[in-house]
Structure formats: C-alpha cells, structure tokens
Amino acid sequence: MRIENIFKLALKDLKREKRNIWLCSVGIGIGIWFLTLTLSGIEGIKKEVEREINQIIDYNIITVYPKLPEGEEGSSLDRLTGFINEKELNEIKKLPGVKLAYRPYDIPSSIIEFAGIKLPFVQFEGVPPEIIGPLQRLQIKEGRFLEKENETVLAKKVARIFRKREEKIVGKEILVTPIFEFSLPIEIKGKYEYFPDIKLPPIKLKVVGIIENSDTFSETSSFSPTTNFVHLNLAKRLWEKAVSKLKIPSVVEIYEYLKKQALSESEVSIPDELLWQRAEEKYEEAKSQLLPFGWINVVAEDKDDVKKLTKILQKKGYEVESAQMMIDETSKIFFVLEAILGFFGVVALFASIFGIINVMYLMVTERKKEIGILKALGAKNRDVYFLFLLEAVIISLAGGIFGIVGAFLSGKIASLILNFVLRGKIGEEGILGLGVPSFSFCIPLKLILIALLIAVIFGVLSALGPARKAACMRPVEVLRNE
Amino acid sequence: MSYILVIKNLYKSFFLNKKKIEVLKGIDLKIKKGDFIAITGPSGSGKTTFLNLIGGLDKPDKGEIIFKEKNLIQLSEEKLAEYRARKIGFVFQFFNLLPYLTALENVILPQMIIGKVSKKTIKKAKEILSKLNLQGKEDHRPYELSGGEQQRVAIARALINKPELILLDEPTGNLDEDNTKDIFSLLKKLNELENITIIIGTHDLEIKNFCKKVFVLKKGKLYED
C-alpha cells in the first residue's frame, strides 16, 4: 500500500475518531505546552539578558588584561601582577581587525563649575574621539562628539543639573578642577602621608555635546549614566601631571616608620629582617601607583573580528573580556537550565504517554473489524502497522501544534502580567537606570520544530505496541468474532 | 481444460473448550475458469471455513489448495495478502463496508491497497457501481444505503481489482427475497458476461436456479447435489 493511500485512509478514519483523538492530542498537547512554555520562558530571559549585556557592553569592544607572570595567580587589575606595556600595546594595534587600541585614562573625581553651580565628584572618562563610531550605544542627544583636547561631552544627567540655572550649555565653557585619588599603600600618618588626593589647577573645557545612555562598557572602565567624556590625550596629560606631584617614600623611610610603629603597638619584638622585607613590599606597592591602568581597550573593526581577535589575544596569553564572551558564558548557564526544565517536560510527556497508549489500544480494539476487512482485502501487516503509526503521527502533531499554540497564548498573557508587575515594583527607570526589563516568552522556530519532533517521537513511541497488535491480528479471527 | 482451483484432501478443525471439532474432513474439489459453484449446507456445516481457506484467510490442518498451480499452504503471509488483493474478490454476509468511507471510496479501497488510484480507477469504480444499479449513490455512506445496496457495493468492491475468483459467503443472508433474487441474477450475469469464476456459500436453495453446479457440505464432506 502506498504511503499516500495509507495517509488518505488515516485521515478519513481519524475524522470519525474525534473523542479518542481529542484524548490523545490533549495528553501530548499538555506535555508539549509545558515543555514549550518553560523553554520559551528561558529563551525570553536569555534574549533579555543578551539585550542587557549588549546595552552594558559594546559588542565590538574587547578589554584586554595583562599577561600574568608564569605560575603566578592573582587579579589582572592588580598593577603589581601585570601591566601591558607600550611595546605590547603597539603590537596589539597592528593585529588584523583592530580598529583602535588604547590604554584608558580617567579623571575619577572633579569639581565642575557652570552658571554659578559647583558640582563635585564628577567623573570624566578619557576616550579617543574615534570611539564614537564603534560605541554606537553612546547617543549624542545634542551637539557633537569630541574632536579637540579642550572639549568635553557631558552626560545628559549632569547637564540637567546645570540646566536648572542655564538652559543653553552646548557651546559654553565650563571650569573643571581635576582631582586624582590615590589609594594609600600603607597607613602612614603625619609626615608620611604621601598619597593624598592630588588637586590640579582648574581648566576650561568647551561643552560640545550632550550624551545619553552612557552605561558601563566594561568592568574596569565604567561609563555610568553620569560619566562625562574628555579627549584621551587630555586625560593622560592630566594624570601624568598628578603623578608627577606624588612623592614616594624610600624603603629606609618606610622601614623606619614600620619599626617605630611596631615598637609602639606590639610588646613582642619583630625581627629586623621581616620588617625590612615588609618595607620593600610596601615600596613596590607604592611605586605601582605611578603606573597607569595595566589593561587596554581594543575596538574591533566589526562584530566578526571580535571572535578572531579574542582567540589571537588569548593565544598570546592575555586575559580577554568581551560582550560575546559574556553572552557565551550566560548561554552555557541557560543551556543547563534548559536541559533541566526540558528534562521535566520530557518526564511530563512520559507520564502522558501511558494515557495515550491506553487510548491507542482502545482504538485498536474498537477497530478490529476494520483491520479484519483491510486484511481480507489484501492489506499487508506492514500496511496496517503504518496506518496506525501514521495516525499516531497525525494525532501527536495535532497535539504538538495545540501545545505550541497554547504555550504561545499563555506566554503572551504571562508576559503581559509579568511586565505589568515588574513596572509596578521597579518603576519606569529600572534598577540600573536601564529601564524596566521587558520580559517576553520567546518561541523561536528551532523550539517549534524541536517541540513538534518530540511530540511525534512520543506519539510514535506510544503507538508502537498498539500498531503491532493491530498488524498481527489474523483477519479470519477478527471477522469470525464479528 | 486446466483447473483454476484444485482442492485436495482438505482438513480443518477447531478447538472449542479444549475439545477438537473437525469441520472439514478431507474435501476434494476441482474448479474450472468460468465456473459458478454454490456450496450449500446448514448453518455451522463449515461453508465459511471452507471459503476462508480458499480465500487465503486461514490455513488448513492438512491438504492442498492449489490456485493456478500455486499451493496456498506454502505461501508466506505477505504472498497470501497479495493473493487476496489481486486474485480474489471477497463478499461477506454482513457486507463489511468501512462505515467512514462513501460507497465509491469503499469500491476503490482494494485499488488503494494494491497502490493504484488514479482518475481511471475512479471512472472504473463509477462504471461498476452504475452496472450494479447504484448510480447516484456514489457519495452515500453505508448507513445511508439499504441492505441490498450495501451488498451490491460489496460486490462492486470485489470486482474492482478484476479478480479471477469471487468468493461470496452468505451474500444474501441479510437480505429479503427480492434483494436475494436480484443479487443472484446479478452474479449469474457477471459469470456469463465476464466469465468470472464464482464460488458462493449459501443455505438459500434458490441459488440452484442460477448457478452451474451445487455442492452440499455435510458432516465435513462435500457432495455434488
């Protein structure tokens, strides 16, 4: 019997078996609904996380951390353990796919004055002007981005404070007093206070633009919503000026201080050798304060270059961080989550399979006469077998579609409720000022196909026994019983 | 003249409550092409069993059923199914039409089984239905037809694959006198015009007026009437 004839017969037959089909379809449909809904929920969260990551970190920016000395472990952010020197930076600049590579400099805390308002603790990030292209996330709301060293671009949130007094700010000059903070390597009081905040003389900067959505683009160089921008060269020059004002105590001075402190605080005498060793360590730590950031930012030509560059840089021994890597990492977590929930979904389907087997056996018993007639007319065992299997495929496909449509509709309703609740709990601005996460159940084509395939597999599995029973029926016995 | 069907020393028994019941006890029969034979006998005499064995629906305990020089006993399940599909046309007492198919679809069913369904098949099925006075009933489902009409649809179904032998098991058992006569004359016409070999199992003695030979099945043995 040709498959199309079996198919025609199966369809004709199923039309009258509405009750049984409904029972089987609902069984499979519920399992598929659960499976699709949970997986689409995870897919939705995954999409949202990816969107957030892309919002936080620009796709084509790679942060490259220094190579660690062999056998040494520690944080790459620790200037004692690593530093990408100028030679290495120049080598990286020449790598294929690199649009831009630079060492970040910032002015962590400044006072800015405009229209009679003095605003403290303002952060400026030094960036090369060419970054505005790759950093598409930074949106110029007014004016333009940096071109010259005496220019600045203010964050919309900062500009808003001045606008209370003076509406027009773009094109005007502001007075900036740069302050560089250095962390103390040791708690030296009195005359040993060598690491105060270095306050430089005020400079005038022309506001050329207002920027919005300047969020963090890496762990190390944070573009918060209140980050303002200056030319990288200016930030570097100011930092060097601040560093030149630092006076580092000598090893002897530190040793003498430590000795004096040890005598006054401890009754037990500390061996001289140990004190000397500690003083040397503190001296090295203090010296490291004179170095700029040890890591660099690499801007790739396009998204495809990010993966290639990441591989090349990792091969060279650098630690690398990019949005793509973070997305890859989160994808792994979501994969595990999907596997766990998928497993529960499959277990739910397994539970429904027994119900379906029951109904299928019932269908075979109810259709004994039909099987007998078909066989008496010359249908082979395999024709009857495939007829029942095909019916199971049609039923399970119907159940699968029912489950997917159900998951789509219930997902839509759940999304609406969840987003409504989230908006009420978090507010329009969101937790990080990134806006309320908009969560939606996402059913990609891949998930639809997988769900349908699972439905068919389970449908066929549950029909194997009943179909075999039907195929093995002897027509003479079936017709005699009639 | 060669025989289309030769039956030699055929035995068949069943077990009922662990008791062996011998239904056929050594039957011999030779049938030529174009024969119209009736097997008569009271209910329970073994007519259905005998027809089932000839039709390849069941296997005998002993003996041979040779259809055109092929011994059915030696055929596999698969080959027997093919034999039923291509060589035999079956007509049952209870019509055995598929209730969810129309009259036309029921007639086409054997063609679907051997894998040939085309516009030609549908035309042919309609022609047969028309010959059997069923024009206009093609789209009716079995429950929308009378007993006589249903049996004529079953005969049309038996004819669609141009079988060499038609087996009818009590085809008029569920029909009234008029319908019975109609069916018998129809079979006679088919036998005379198309030279189709027919074996009919019936307890209706009216058949004597229509067929060429009558056999009586009695106590497991076959006697010519």
Image (spheres, rainbow, N blue to C red):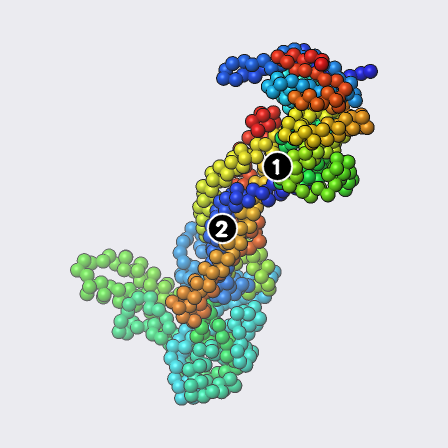
What's the chain of the residue with tag 2?
A: A
Name of the residue lying farthest toward the left: A267
Q: Quadrant of residue A91?
A: bottom right
Q: Amino acid at mark 1?
A: Leu
* Residue drawn at (38%, 84%) of the image: A118
| Chain of residue at mark 1 | A
**Dot 1 and dot 2 within a common chain:** yes
Q: Residue at x 55, y 50 (%)?
A: A401
Mark 1, other Cα within 10 Å: few <14 / some 14–19 / many ≥20: many
* Residue position for label 2: A33
**Viewer-nearest residue: A320 or A252:** A320
The reply, left or right, for residue A100 in relation to residue A187 is right
- Residue A358 percent location from the top left of the image: 49, 37
Which amino acid type is marked by label 2? Trp
Which residue is identified by label 1?
A: A387
Q: Is residue B204 above or below residue A228?
A: above
Query: In this orientation, does residue A353 appear?
Result: yes
* Mark 2, secondary structure of its residue: helix
* Tag of residue A396: none
* A192 to the left or right of B17: left
Q: Quick one: quadrant of the N terminus of chain A?
A: top right
Residue A76 position, x and y percent, is 43, 59
Q: Nearer the viewer, residue B25 or A11?
A: B25
Q: Determine whether, in the image, residue A80 is placed left or right of residue B78.
A: left
**In percent of the image, x 71 and y 13: which residue is there?**
B224
Indicate the quadrant containing the C terminus of chain A: top left, top right, bottom left or bottom right.
top right
